[in-house]
Image (cartoon, rainbow, N blue to C red):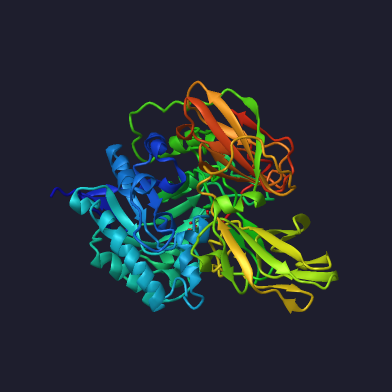
Amino acid sequence: MSTRPALTLDSHRFLRGGHEHRVVSAAVHYFRIHPELWRDRLQRLRAMGCNTVELYIAWNFHQPTPGPARFDGWHDVAAFIREADSLGLDVIARPGPYICAEWDLGGLPAWLLADESLRLRTADPTYLAAVDQWFDQLIPVLAELQTSRGGPIVAVQVENEYGSYGNDKAYLEHLKDGLVARGIDCLLFTSDGPEPRMLAGGTLPGVLATANFGSRPGEAFTTLATFQPDAPLVCMEFWNGWFDHYGGPHHVRDTTDAAEALDGILAAGGSVNIYMGHGGTNFGWWAGANHTGKTLADPGYLSTITSYDYDAPIGEAGELTEKFHAFREVIGRHVPLPDTELPAQPRRVDPRTVPATRVASLRGSLDLLSAALRRPAPEPIEKLGHHCGLVHYRNHITGPGGPATLTVDGIRDLAQIFLDGHLVGVLERDDPSPTIELSVPEGGAELEILVEPFGRVNYGPHLADRKGLVAGVRLDHQHLFDWDIRVLPLDDLTALPTTAAAETDDGPAFHRAVVDLPEAADAFLSVPGSHRTLVWLNGFLLGRLRTEKGPQRTLYAPAPVWRAGANEILVLDLAAAATPLTVELRAEPDLGPIAAAPQY
Ligand code: GLA
């Protein structure tokens, strides 16, 4: 078995095979990049001057439901790491199991939330048993790819910013021991915010402490060096951009300011991981959320958008931005740049507008899309064996007729309420009063509540963010029991009709457009006039738009999802706002009005 020089510590320096070494890394998430573009994005990162790539591993991406984890195709993290290796990049792996990352539930699988007594990110035996079976599957894959076995992995992180969350050292020790017991023999490290309490909570003796920050490198490194005097200085997440929430601005970080901060880190002798080098996309249902409330029930829920462009130096569609060139120049002052040509911009579509045909109403297609479960009370999707999807709740209200107040508690995150097929109200999670005044017909009525969950909270004290209806529904003071519930992951829409719908119900509806392309190319899709949509290209869920809230008005549709010839675009128009509906294929993204990224 061949080995390679390990990354080791010598007081304040890193060594590689006896020589002083500086880690110049950037973060890239394989789960946010179409696998046919992995190599392209890694090449760009190498061209920027990075000698290392850092990746999180998202547990829920591999094991969304209990059962064997997937490592095939898009889930083949070993293939991604080998691709990096083939380009001469070292690899830093951050297997969590919690990763934060603006990813649904911070990478933890939603099935952990089926058990309300389980305590996430602690030494709770039920949680540890779940982590251990995952590590049994994942860690041997990573161990095989370490430098000690001839691979590119030079370092592995324990948990993620644990000091921002808790203080359970037995949990951190369990993770560290679990990595070592499963064959990890490379450098271990933790990462935390550069504050004494965070460092105290998140670090372990004998494990390198690193710090995460985006500005004022001098101050951050002083705090880190005070906490850990005899070690190299590492900024494990240099935040050079930021993420966006629906209803907020698109955050950007000034290039000169970001380049100066990067230079400050490197000039101080530090090593760096640029977060993000290339952000990518929260395809499907995978975007996370934040929560600023004192409790999860308080207002303060902020859902993260589909784009994870992050204003990174390599844009969402692989663009080499102004920041790329500025960073390359700064990096070149501190480590040798590779002698390679800069990659060209990937091809983009010729813009066009395509009409779509309304092919089916959502509520009229329920039987085609999912089976109903009967439950006494509304349940969140985690207790129904699912991890994502819309949720449809149906109840028969008996008479007597007359006015009544409907109260829907615990909406996660937006609910449309239909009485006998007519939309009677829309309620959102943070509405101060989740009630609707109804007029119940004599003889009763069919009540339907269609819930649209957004991302699960991925950061902060309130992680157990179950989706669907998490409390109860009442008519005046009477609880409504005996529900038919359907979770609609919408992962297979092939049963939907392809021609114009005969029915005319006014709720959410699927619209279908067909577009012929001479060859596959990158595109940015928008749905003018719509409010909330989910958009599929050739069966692949590109993500969701909240065009009326923004900031993002286009979805990135990468070339590998297109094909030469006919392509099918399906739009689920949830607010039934855009009639007739058209889809625009654009050559440029529209991520919305910009504002300066917060500086930490
Ligand atoms: C923290 C986390 C990352 C990410 C950034 C913000 O540093 O460790 O996963 O969430 O914040 O983008």
Q: Residue visible at 28% across and 42% down?
A: 85
Relative side of 496 to 418, left or right: left
Residue 23, position as x, y percentages in the image: 35, 48
Determine whether 397 is above or below 344 in the image.
below
Q: Residue visible at 55% across and 41% down?
A: 536
Q: Residue visible at 50% across and 60% down?
A: 387
Determine whether 158 is above or below 31 in the image.
below
Q: Is residue 357 visible?
A: yes
Q: In which quarter of the view is residue 376 placed?
A: bottom right
Total marks shown come to: 0
- Quadrant location, the C terminus: bottom right
Residue 241, position as x, y percentages in the image: 55, 46
Name, please, the residue furthest toward the left.
1
Q: Nearer the viewer, residue 417 or 238?
A: 417
Q: Is residue 469 visible?
A: no
Q: Nearer the viewer, residue 391 or 552?
A: 391
Relative side of 467 to 431, left or right: left
Relative side of 221 to 391, left or right: left
Determine whether 314 is above or below 467 in the image.
above
Q: In which quarter of the view is residue 451 placed?
A: bottom right
Residue 102, position as x, y percentages in the image: 53, 55
Q: Nearer the viewer, residue 227 or 289?
A: 289
Residue 37, position as x, y percentages in the image: 41, 36
